[in-house]
């Protein structure tokens, strides 16, 4: 069992990130609401039109503390990100600035809730069903990855740009045609293992590349390619998963890839989200890398190498 790079960063960043958000105060409900997870009696579900914003909040804008205000913030961020994703026609180009900003605000809210299960449940009750399911799946996956990485030592973190989303989607499609492994599963593995290739260093256990292969496993399943090349790595992962039981049993194949039920559950949550929601992949692609409570990528950040501890 090994922690994917993203799992290690989730473990390092969630606690500090929530602490910063709580300390910043501001917003409806304040830190007391976040600590208690209380819910206003008979509060209505958040209506999308009531929370529509013309522009996204600043990258460090304080998060509200109560479930109703958090639901409104998540609803606005989700709606803004979906509008921006629908308008993003050329996915060989980087995401537009408004998609990046809205996705970041959505990510910040979900990270805030991931360590507050009681507040997360109360907030979900205020959300429309589709966003409630997204919130449930992403926060549960983050908690699983945090548990998976618990106890592993801090290490240096190097980041770089991901390949364009359209390029990654072509890699997933090529691997699907050759090995029968679903694009949604390959995308979820790519996300969980390296945040779509943004994380560039080897893991603490020695796994390498955007799909995080151990050297011996790559030798057996890497098809003679370069473990650090996104296309080669995705094809190698599809080969390994197919040899391990996919697509007949993704759970068995993913357990072979990384023998932890926490890992399997996290990947499958993301995969199901991507499969059912056409906007999910560009939204997740628009999320940023955090480590040690700091955001390493995205608006206002210039970073290539960081200590994670």
Image: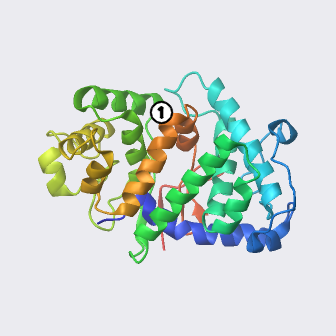
Asked which secondary structure carries label 1, the reply is helix
Nearest the eye: 307 or 31? 31
Q: Residue at x 28, y 44 (%)?
A: 249
* Residue 154 percent coordinates (x, y): 42, 74
Q: How many marks do you count on the picture?
A: 1
The residue singled out by tag 1 in the image is 165
The quarter holding residue 21 reads bottom right
For this orientation, the residue located farthest to the front is 42
Nearest the eye: 101 or 121? 121
- Depicted 252 relative to depicted 205: above or below: above
Nearest the eye: 249 or 288? 249
- Mark 1 packing: few (<14 Cα in 10 Å), some, or many (20+)? many
- Depicted 81 relative to depicted 220: above or below: above
* Residue 138 percent coordinates (x, y): 56, 53
Is 289 placed left or right of 193 in the picture?
A: right
Q: Quadrant of the N terminus?
A: bottom left
- Depicted 145 relative to depicted 217: above or below: below
Q: Is residue 156 visible?
A: yes
Q: Is residue 25 visible?
A: no
Q: Residue at x 73, y 54 (%)?
A: 125
Display coloring: rainbow
Q: Residue at x 47, y 42 (%)?
A: 272
The quarter holding residue 203 reads bottom left
- Depicted 237 relative to depicted 111: above or below: above
* Residue 53 percent coordinates (x, y): 83, 39
* Residue 152 percent coordinates (x, y): 38, 74
Nearest the eye: 4 or 119? 119
């Amino acid at each position: 069992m090994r922690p994917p790079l993203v799992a290690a960063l989730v473990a390092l960043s969630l606690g500090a990130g929530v602490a910063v958000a709580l300390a910043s105060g501001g917003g409806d409900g304040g830190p007391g609401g976040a600590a208690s997870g209380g819910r206003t009696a008979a509060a209505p579900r958040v209506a999308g039109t009531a929370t529509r914003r013309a522009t996204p909040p600043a990258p460090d804008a304080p998060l509200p503390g109560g479930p109703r205000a958090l639901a409104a913030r998540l609803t606005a961020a989700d709606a803004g990100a979906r509008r921006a994703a629908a308008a993003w026609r050329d996915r060989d180009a980087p995401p537009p600035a408004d998609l990046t900003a809205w996705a970041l605000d959505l990510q910040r809210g979900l990270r805030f809730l991931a360590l507050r299960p009681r507040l997360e449940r109360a907030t979900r009750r205020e959300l429309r069903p589709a966003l409630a399911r997204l919130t449930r799946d992403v926060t549960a996956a983050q908690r699983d990855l945090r548990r998976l990485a618990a106890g592993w030592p801090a290490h240096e973190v190097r980041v770089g740009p991901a390949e364009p989303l359209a390029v990654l989607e072509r890699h997933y499609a090529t691997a699907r045609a050759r090995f029968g492994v679903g694009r949604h599963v390959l995308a979820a593995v790519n996300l969980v293992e390296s945040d779509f290739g943004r994380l560039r260093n080897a893991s603490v256990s020695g796994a390498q590349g955007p799909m995080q292969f151990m050297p011996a496993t790559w030798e057996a399943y890497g098809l003679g390619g370069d473990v650090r090349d996104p296309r080669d790595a995705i094809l190698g992962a599809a080969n390994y998963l197919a040899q391990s039981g996919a697509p007949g049993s993704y759970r068995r194949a993913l357990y072979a890839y990384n023998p932890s039920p926490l890992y399997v559950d996290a990947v499958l949550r993301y995969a199901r989200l991507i499969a059912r929601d056409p906007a999910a992949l560009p939204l997740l692609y628009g999320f940023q890398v955090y480590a040690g409570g700091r955001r390493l990528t995205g608006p206002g950040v210039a970073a290539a190498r960081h200590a994670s501890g």
